[in-house]
Image: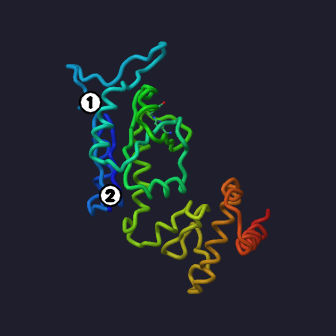
Amino acid sequence: MPTRFDVITLFPDLFRILLDQGVTGRALARGLAELHLWNPRDFTHDVHRTVDDRPYGGGPGMVMKVEPLREAIQAARAAAPQSRVAYLSPQGRVLDQAAMLEIAACPGWILLAGRYEGVDERLIESHVDEEWSIGDYVLSGGELPAMVVMDAVIRLLPGALGHADSARQDSHMDGLLDCPHYTRPERIEEGSVPSVLIGGDHAAIKRWRLRQALGRTWQRRPDLLKRRGLSEAERTLLDEFILAHRE
Ligand SMILES: NC(=O)c1ccc(NCc2cccc(O)c2)nc1
């Protein structure tokens, strides 16, 4: 059963990025996921095809009107009755990898990508199920956030990545930052590859990678470590890292 994405956007051409190449392009081509685009301008009925207007109360910028968005959402819901509606905005819940896993578990999503200063609040209150943010910063539109969410989610779909394991081993999986990676040649002016990775001791390599992931998380994102907690074995590996890296 493919995961279906219906995106409501004034700029459908921007989404060619997802369709044309990479993991998302292949997944969409193989039917692991579906992408349907709906332009609110196609749901206007005035000669100027008006989708936005000035804000009540004054102030800069424009606000997206309810009616074209309502009709676009209703058309998408008719085509995707199992999907929930999510609005991308800086006022939404900030998404992390755990949230992407939750999103990937649903049959489909209708993603509302706003422009301008946002949309009329009455549309959000009446037709939007969830409000999401990809981080605490303002962009010129919700399209890039929508593509970020679709990219993160599509990678998690079974079969989307060549090697089934790579999704699971993605950094920020299991709540830790990723370990360092190296490839050929072994010796270059920038330095050499850690010897444990050259040998064939897979248990030692596994331990080294987990120790590095724990250590880097401890150094760079102690907030993630606190939230995650550590097993006894992980505590030991982290202590080894700290001992080896104390100034
Ligand atoms: N952090 C995000 O996920 C994000 C999402 C959208 C966006 N821009 C469009 C927009 C939409 C709504 C209100 C608003 O003020 C701006 N910018 C950042």
Q: Nearer the viewer, residue 66 or 88?
A: 66
The residue lying at 27 percent from left, 63 percent from top is 30
The answer to which quarter of the image holds residue 75 is top left
Contact (CB < 8 A) between labels 2 and 1?
no
**Measured from the top left, where is residue 200 in percent x and y?**
56, 86
The extreme bottom residue here reads: 200
- Gap in Å between the C-alphas at discs 2 and 1? 25 Å
Q: Check disc 2 and report the residue beneath it.
A: 33
Q: Check disc 1 and report the residue beneath it.
A: 41
The residue lying at 76 percent from left, 67 percent from top is 242
Give, as a three-letter code, the residue at label 2.
Ala
**Viewed as shown, does residue 120 lie left or right of 67?**
right
Q: Secondary structure at mark 1?
A: helix
**Measured from the top left, where is residue 17 in percent x and y?**
32, 49
The residue lying at 46 percent from left, 31 percent from top is 125
Q: Is mark 2 within 8 Å of ligand 1?
A: no
**Measured from the top left, where is residue 8 in percent x and y?**
33, 39
- Sequence-earlier tag: 2 or 1: 2
Q: Is residue 45 above or below residue 86?
A: above
Q: Is mark 1 within 8 Å of ligand 1?
A: no
Q: Is residue 112 above or below residue 219?
A: above
**Viewed as shown, does residue 15 lie left or right of 152?**
left
Q: Nearer the viewer, residue 94 or 23?
A: 94
